[in-house]
Image (cartoon, rainbow, N blue to C red):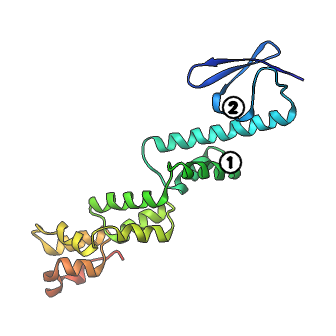
Amino acid sequence: MPKVTALRSERLGRALVELDGAAWRTLPLDVVARVGLVAGIELDRPRLRLLRRELRRHEALDTAARALRRRERSSAAVRERLARDGVSPAARDEVLETLERNGLVDDARYAARRAEALAERGSGDALIRWQLERDGVAAGLIEAALASLDAEAERATRLVSRARDPARAARSLARKGFSTESIEAALPEVVAEGGSATVRYVD
């Protein structure tokens, strides 16, 4: 049975493992620690199985970290990325649990920030809700995120405050997912003139 005879530090948090005096392979230091690889220990079948499991876990975490490097994502989006990379369902669950426990993935925070960003770009509640549903965010978290925003009617009023063509502005609000009620509150003159009949609302 092969025996670990030495561990040599390598760059970027990795260690070269020697078996029976010969270089075997380079492993991440966290995997080495979790498997308990130290000089003098035999690499039996149970330890090899543990090593393979920990390597898969490490690779899955690395995949998730790359997905989160550029921007925050929902847990569903991270899970989808792991699935595309061939990570097993059990490993996906374990990785998501680790990320959520460490605050790297937080759907409530994601929903609030995403809703705020979309609102700042002029989206109405229906469009924000649709985007968050597409991102896999739970319904309760979506409603909480929407509730944290300024009232939709207030946002609509700000967007059209300098509009020269109220009917056109109303149609624009509808395309951006504002409700009929919010559009009527922001542009009462369109309703008074019967212009609302030309607006295609997105509710």
Q: Which residue is drawn at 33% across and 60% down?
A: 116
Q: Which residue is drawn at 50% across and 48% down?
A: 104
Q: The C terminus is located in which quarter?
A: bottom left
Above or below, 50 against 154 in this view is: above
Which one is nearer the viewer's eye here, 191 or 123? 123
Residue 72 place in picture, x, y as percent = 44, 49
Dot 2: what SS?
Answer: helix
Residue at numbered disc 2 = 33
Res 160 → quadrant: bottom left
Residue at numbered disc 1 = 91
CA distance for labels 1 and 2? 19 Å
Q: Tag 1: residue type?
A: Ala
Residue 188 place in picture, x, y as percent = 16, 82
Dot 1: what SS?
Answer: helix
Mark 1 neighbour class, 10 Å CA radius: few under 14, some 14 to 19, many 20 or more: many
Q: The N terminus is located in which quarter?
A: top right
Above or below, 28 against 114 in this view is: above
Above or below, 178 against 57 in this view is: below
Res 36 → quadrant: top right
Res 132 → quadrant: bottom left
Q: In this view, does 168 lie to the left or right of 116?
A: left
- Of the numbered discs in the image, which one, if any, rests on residue 176? none
Q: Tag 2: residue type?
A: Ala
Q: Residue at x 69, y 52 (%)?
A: 89
Q: Which of marks 1 and 2 is in front?
A: 2
Residue 151 place in picture, x, y as percent = 27, 73
Mark 2 neighbour class, 10 Å CA radius: few under 14, some 14 to 19, many 20 or more: few
Q: In this view, does 95 lie to the left or right of 90?
A: left
